[in-house]
Amino acid sequence: MVEAIHLQLLLATFAGWVTRQQAQAISYLIEENRVLKEQLVAHGRSLRLTDDQRRRLAAKGRPLGRELLGRVATIVTPDTIMAWYRRLIASKWTYPRAKVGRPGVMKEIRTLIVQMAEENPGWGYCRIQGGLKSLNHQVARSTIAKVLKEHGIAPATGRPSSWRTFIKSHAAVIAAADFLTTEAWMARGLVTHYTLFVIDIATRRVHIAGTTVHPTCVWMAQAARNLTDCMDGFLKGKRYLIVDRDALFSEQFKAMLRSSGTKIVCTSIQAPNMNAFAERFVLSIKSECLDRMIFVGGDSLDRGIREFAIHYLTERPHQGLDNVVICGGPISSDGRVEVRDRLGGLLKCYYRQAA
């Protein structure tokens, strides 16, 4: 019993000594802070604390209370520390926490994953992974699958190939054909003429296959022979010809093209956008030429179409080709500006006269 009492007295004495030591240390630190602050004021300088420093002081000072802070705080006032606490701590401005788990995928890599999947419908997760590896990006297959799922992109086996992708991938071997109709005055009145044309998708070159009042199967068969001529046929080297579902494209016409190695690709029903290049040529020739003229006889119509075709190929810049003329020559920066007229000034071309 006596030993227990002696132990308690010893602990109390030790605790009192520790408390005195802590009080002396705190008193020294307070005085040291005052001296530092006086030195800053004497040299006309002020403390500039970072947000992290303010947060740390607010986190440590808030439990002391305003009264105790008034005795120990020397750098700033208790009101300032409390204001920091309300603004930074209460607004959940906390210590940065280390992220746990696998690091996230950079935005650049996510963009590349989506781009590769959209531009290459046949690429699966492993193929995309290989493409990223060639760019020095190490990405797991599961990560690629997760990113594509977040963007609503199905796996390669369930990802349909778009029409735009087909056109872009095979542009060099694709042509498109269509009819444009024009009315011309004849002896028996206003008669509709049918003009068959073919456009090269890659170069935008247009070939007028012919104009007739009666596009019969025989006429269409002859047009097919001319287009697929082994010497100078416009479709030489073309693997695909896009046509709509117009009955004028007869089975005999299609059979002759297939026999020459050109596959017929029919557009969907009521989908003119699938033959957009041909439709755009129809819009251009009608708005810039045919709709602005009155034709009397088939010869005048043929001349109008022929003159526009020459203008279209050799003089007219094309927005789809970055405003380049399809069959244009080098552009000169010297010489006088001249104007070349066609069809009585309906079609104009500005160029520089060589010096």
Image (spheres, grey):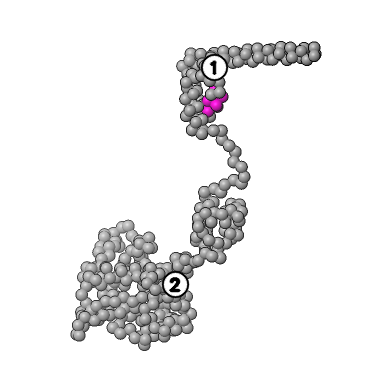
Would you name the residue on which mark 2 appears? Answer: 174
SS assignment at label 2: strand
Which quadrant would residue 353 be assigned to in this image?
A: bottom left
Q: How far apart are marks 2 and 1 (CA)?
A: 85 Å
Q: Which image quadrant: the N terminus?
A: top right
Contact flag, marks 2 and 1 (Cβ < 8 Å): no
- Give the residue pinned by disc 1: 68
Q: Residue at the location (50% across, 23% down)?
A: 81
Q: Look at the image and tell me whether residue 330 can be seen.
A: no
Horizontal side of residue 258 vs 21, given as left or right? left
Q: Is the magenta stretch mostly helix, strand or loop?
A: helix
Question: What residue span does the magenta drawing correspond to?
Answer: 55-61
Residue 162 place in picture, x, y as percent = 47, 66
Nearest-to-viewer mark from 2 and 1:
1
The quadrant of the image that shows the C terminus is bottom left
Amino acid type at image mark 1: Leu
Q: Which of 174 and 68 is in front in this view?
A: 68
| Amino acid type indicated by mark 2 | Ile
